[in-house]
Structure formats: C-alpha cells, structure tokens
Image (spheres, grey):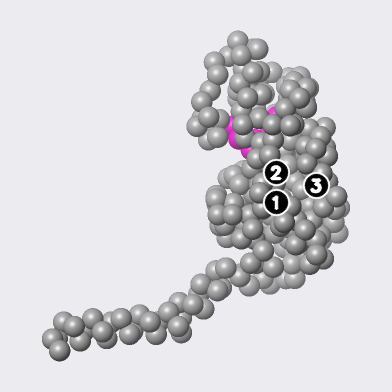
Amino acid sequence: MSLILTAMIVVTAFLALYWVFYGQRKHNEMMNPKRKTELKAILFDLDGVIIDSFEAWFSVFNQLRKKYNLKEISKEEFRKKVWGGSVERDAKEFFNNLDPKVLKKEYEKLMGKNAKKTKLNGDAEKVLKAIKHKKFKIGLVTNSPGSIVNKILNFHKIDKYFDVVITADDVEKAKPYPDPILKACEKLKVMPDEIMYVGDTKIDYKAGKSAGAFVVGLNTHGDLVISRLRDLLQLL
C-alpha cells in the first residue's frame, strides 16, 4: 500500500470520527438551538411567510404609481426596496410624500379586490396546526392594514389559528420598530425572550432583534435561517 493511499485512509477515518463526535453534535445544536427560557409563543409575519401575496402587492403598487403619474418599478426593485415596508415609508419614499392615510385607503381598496390573487403558503396550514397541537400560542405581526389582513385571513380560512393579530393599525410605529412584536407579546402575556418570530425580510429581523426575540429567517437574516416553513417544526 502506497504512502499516499495510507494517508488518505487515515484522513478519511479522522473526518468520520470528527463528524461522529463533534460535527453531528454541532449540527444538532444549530438545528435545535438551546434557549435560556421556555418557548411559549411563535409569531409570524404574514406576507411572504404565511401568505404568498408578492404578485398581488406588486400589481397594486404599480397600479398606484401609474395613477399618480410615477414610473412603474421592476419586480427586483420592488422586492429589494419596497417589500415588507410600512405604508408610511411607501408614502414618503415612493409616492412623493403622499398623505399616508390616503395611500392606506388606496391600498385597502385595491388589495380588497386582489385578495383572491393571494396564495396560502403550501406549508402554512400544516405548520399552524402542528404548533396549535403542541399548545404554543400563535400570533401574527404584519405591517399591512387591518382591513386587508382580515380579508386575506378570512378568505383562506386561517384566522382561527391565531391567538392575536397585530397590524399596522394597532401601533404608532410599524416594523422595523419593535412595537408590533412587543404589542403581540403584551396581548399574549409572554416575554419577548419567550417567543420565536418568523419573518422573510431584513425588516422582520430588525424588528425581532430590537424586541429581544429569537428570530427565524425564512430565506433571510435570522438567528436561525430556514429554507421552508415546515423546517420550523424541527425546532419545536
């Protein structure tokens, strides 16, 4: 047996032992991070997490841009600069300081008509059912106006899963401020370090961390990043 072959066998054996005694343990720790406090509630963002509403919102946004004689933007720019933001930010940055109350009414009118264009995330109901079965409290925290949220939840028949729903109407400062998450914690009677917040944007991450929560990022920044919503069940 050559010296090189012997060395390869030794290295392979070492790597195998490393995985058994250390690598597997670190992998498990990453998938099931230890918590200093008991997990009591799981909060979710709506758009992009529970509901696939990107196409509906993109259409509504550009319809309004056109109405106000503004240039339509691409999907890439919308996803990067607009998606997940608040009505106040949209009004200031993308509609020439339009009164946020006016923009909110425009959004409510058009999204009300487009609720049927939204889709339930394929994993969403399965995940919500499983979490409910495990006796965790469930909350929804979104920057969308309340009337739009209610129509979407009722249309997809998933309102029954949420113990609390916090929308842009319930707080003075929407995400990325922590106010909506803290409001949900208050309603659920839990502390921020007793929850997980699941979001799909940097805005969600900033809000969650500012509130003191453990943030799970769905294909985005997070204390833990998952690629599918159902991966969340491995943490419970």
- Residue 124's tag is 1
Q: Mark 2 and mark 3: span between their CA atoms?
A: 9 Å
Q: Is 16 drawn above or below residue 138 in the view shown?
A: below
- Looking at the image, the residue that sits furthest to the top is 69
Q: Quadrant of residue 168?
A: top right
- Residue 158 is situated, as x and y percent measured from the top left of the image, at 80, 47
Secondary structure that dominates the magenta span: loop
Mark toward the start of the polypeptide (1 vs 3): 1
Q: Are marks 2 and 1 in contact (CB under 8 Å)?
A: yes
- Residue 2 is situated, as x and y percent measured from the top left of the image, at 13, 86
Question: Regarding mark 3 in the picture, which secondary structure is present there?
Answer: loop
Q: Mark 2 and mark 1: span between their CA atoms?
A: 7 Å
The N terminus: image quadrant: bottom left
- Residue 105 is situated, as x and y percent measured from the top left of the image, at 78, 22
Q: Amino acid at mark 1?
A: Ala
Q: Which residues are magenta?
A: 82-87
The C terminus: image quadrant: bottom right
Depth check, front residue: 49 or 39: 49
Residue that appears at 83% across and 39% down: 154
Residue that appears at 74% across and 67% down: 39
Q: Amino acid at mark 3?
A: Ile
Depth check, front residue: 178 or 62: 62
Q: Are marks 1 and 3 in contact (CB under 8 Å)?
A: yes
Depth check, front residue: 101 or 25: 25
Q: Is 222 drawn above or below residue 73 in the view shown?
A: below
**Residue matched to label 3:** 158
Question: Regarding mark 1 in the picture, which secondary structure is present there?
Answer: helix
- Residue 120's tag is 2
- Residue 89's tag is none
Q: Quadrant of residue 72?
A: top right
